[in-house]
Image (spheres, rainbow, N blue to C red):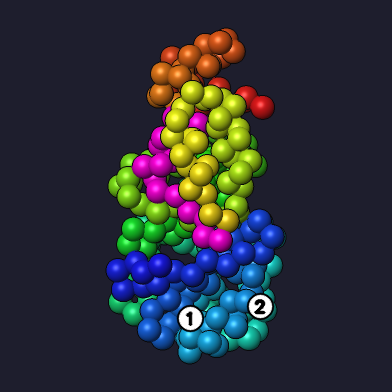
Amino acid sequence: MVITGLHLEQFRCGDNLAYMLYGKKGAVAIDGVAWEEMLRFLDKQGLSLTYVTNTHGHFDHTVGNEPLLRHSRALYLDHNEFPDGVAIEIEGEAIRVYRTPGHTADSVCFHAGGILITGDTLFNGTVGNCFSGDLRAFFRSIKRLMALPGDTLIYAGHDYGRDSVALAKQLEPDNPDIDQFRQAYDPGHVYSTLAEELKINPYLRFNAPAIIALLKEHDLPCATEEERWLSLMSIE
């Protein structure tokens, strides 16, 4: 995948998804859980690992940091220290960092060209659990991501595609876009567009008439966008 002057490579370790953004010589590893495969990729491509960083501090995302740093000359960039909107540069190309608290208080997303690496904030078809306990902050983070262009490619921290689509279908059984998304799902390259998410992801569809009707059926608050979000997050 080419993003302006950068390329993206996705790596899998179980259901975890790790990423490398790279140019002609330098690379950034994000959530490098698949560190052995990532090191082999660097060697094969003749790349030098410049930075190692994370979308948040959960161990299943940070476990690759130490071996990646040990086997390279890369600099560790602590995601906790990123100011909102700061840019990491690789060969003159900017990777913008958004602070997106919700799943955890320290969650961030990385935006490069038309690609958004979302960690456990936004999955393909669902959103992360709110381990921070701050659902309102999570709502603001999701609203921020929803404002990006529809052709933005969403690369998440886990592949929960099948389960996510099953839940979306359960909540909105008459939505034909969910069936189309399920048919196109490819576990070998897991991503979606923001436009697709707005059509199939129930946690981004809090303004859809079918979702509002569902909340009313459950006798849940739904007068405002925030109320609808909070109500959706309460459905199990």
Q: Nearer the viewer, residue 186 or 67?
A: 186
Dot in front, 2 or 1 = 2
Q: What amino acid type should be assigned to the residue bearing mark 2? A: Glu
| Residue 83 image label | none
Q: Position of residue 145 (x, y in %)?
A: 40, 45
Q: Can you identify the residue that label 2 sits on? A: 36
Q: Can you identify the residue that label 1 sits on? A: 50
At 34% across and 80% down in the image, what residue appears?
91
Q: Relative to 228, does residue 123 appear above or below in the rendering?
A: below
Q: How many marks?
A: 2
Q: Which residues are magenta?
A: 188-205
In screen coordinates, is 168 left or right of 62?
left
Is residue 28 highlighted in magenta? no
At 53% across and 16% down in the image, what residue appears?
215
Q: Relative to 43, does residue 218 appear above or below in the rendering?
A: above
> In this orientation, does residue 3 appear?
yes
Q: Nearer the viewer, residue 204 or 191?
A: 191
Q: Residues within 10 Å of mark 1 (few under 14, many from 20)?
A: some
In screen coordinates, is 116 left or right of 233?
left
Q: What amino acid type should be assigned to the residue bearing mark 1? A: Thr
Among numbered discs 2 and 1, the one appearing first in the sequence: 2
Q: Position of residue 197 (x, y in %)?
A: 44, 40
Dot 2 falls on a residue whose secondary structure is helix
In screen coordinates, is 38 left or right of 175?
right
Q: CA distance from mark 2 to mark 1?
A: 16 Å
Q: Relative to 178, does residue 40 appear above or below in the rendering?
A: below
Q: Residues within 10 Å of mark 2 (few under 14, many from 20)?
A: few
